[in-house]
Image: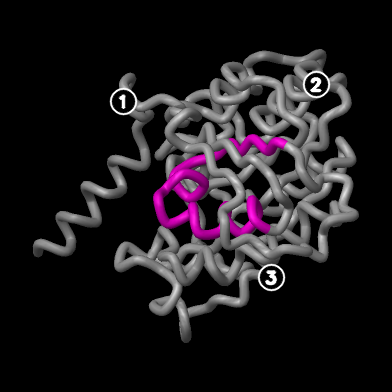
Amino acid sequence: MVSHLFAVLFALLLMFPAAPGRRPDPAANTLLPSCERPADSTYRSSPNYGKSIAVFGGSLSVNKESDVAKQIWADLLNAQVTTYGVGGAGFSCEQGYSLQRQVDTADVYDVYVLWASTNDFNGGRECGSWQDYSEYDGYDSSKLATQCGGINYCIKKLREKNPSARIYFFTSLRFFRRDSGYNPFSADVNATGKSFADYVNAQIQCCRYHGVPVLDQFSIQDVDIYNCEEFYLPDKLHMNQEGYRRIGPIQAAFLANGR
């Protein structure tokens, strides 16, 4: 009974936007290279070595556990990593303190990382298509309520903010609260009739349209129902430090090489 009540309350938290007081706090979420960083990083010749990196996303991008991964980036790339992410956020303008709003408030950086969450799917926001809020629909502002419209808005806005910046995209990670969260062949769908894999595939399609490099975390995370307890918190949605320690070097290599 208690576990069922917890599940219901958790679902409600995901469905409703973040409270007004929950805003990006970049000053409190900036990491610099540590004194333990490698003296001679293999990524020293990377075009992103020694650059400033801004991260946008939901809780998976900003939870304290995520600092494990981002410190790996900072150390291997000798980079400053600043996070604008807010728990509960999605790309849809209706999902929490959305990535659209995060991007609007961001300063100019050398590198921008759009880190997709699970919130658009779990919050029942429309997935949309790669044409949402693009030249193909005349930048229809009504499409900013879809995941894809939000992605296209963020990329366009970041291009305007700093045309020479490099933009990278991390797809949603797996989660293990329901079958669709980890099974790409699942028939389990949300209120819009889409599976979680549909949302991830749409993320990739938007990035292909823009030519933005994509790290398909859903497909390469190397975590499944047999080992998820080692890498996830008990809520089966958020990763623990070991989970971020597992994915961090992969993210750093992607940011270094752009593929």
Depth check, mark 3 against mark 2: the one in front is: 2
CB contact under 8 Å: marks 3 and 2: no
Q: Is residue 65 magenta?
A: yes
> Answer yes or no: do the residues labelled 1 and 3 have beta carbons within 8 Å?
no
Coordinates of residue 47 in the picture (x, y in percent):
88, 46
Q: Secondary structure at mark 3?
A: helix
User: 118 and 75: which one is in front?
Assistant: 75
Q: Which mark is residue 19?
A: 1
Give the CA distance from mark 3 to mark 2.
Answer: 30 Å
- Badge 1 amino acid: Ala
Residue at the (36%, 29%) spot, across then down: 18
If you read the primary sequence from the N terminus, does the residue marked by circle 1 or circle 2 appear first?
Answer: 1
Q: Nearer the viewer, residue 37 or 116?
A: 37
Q: Which mark is residue 162?
A: 2
Q: Which span of residues is magenta-colored?
A: 52-75
Instruction: Name the quadrant of the C terminus.
Output: bottom right
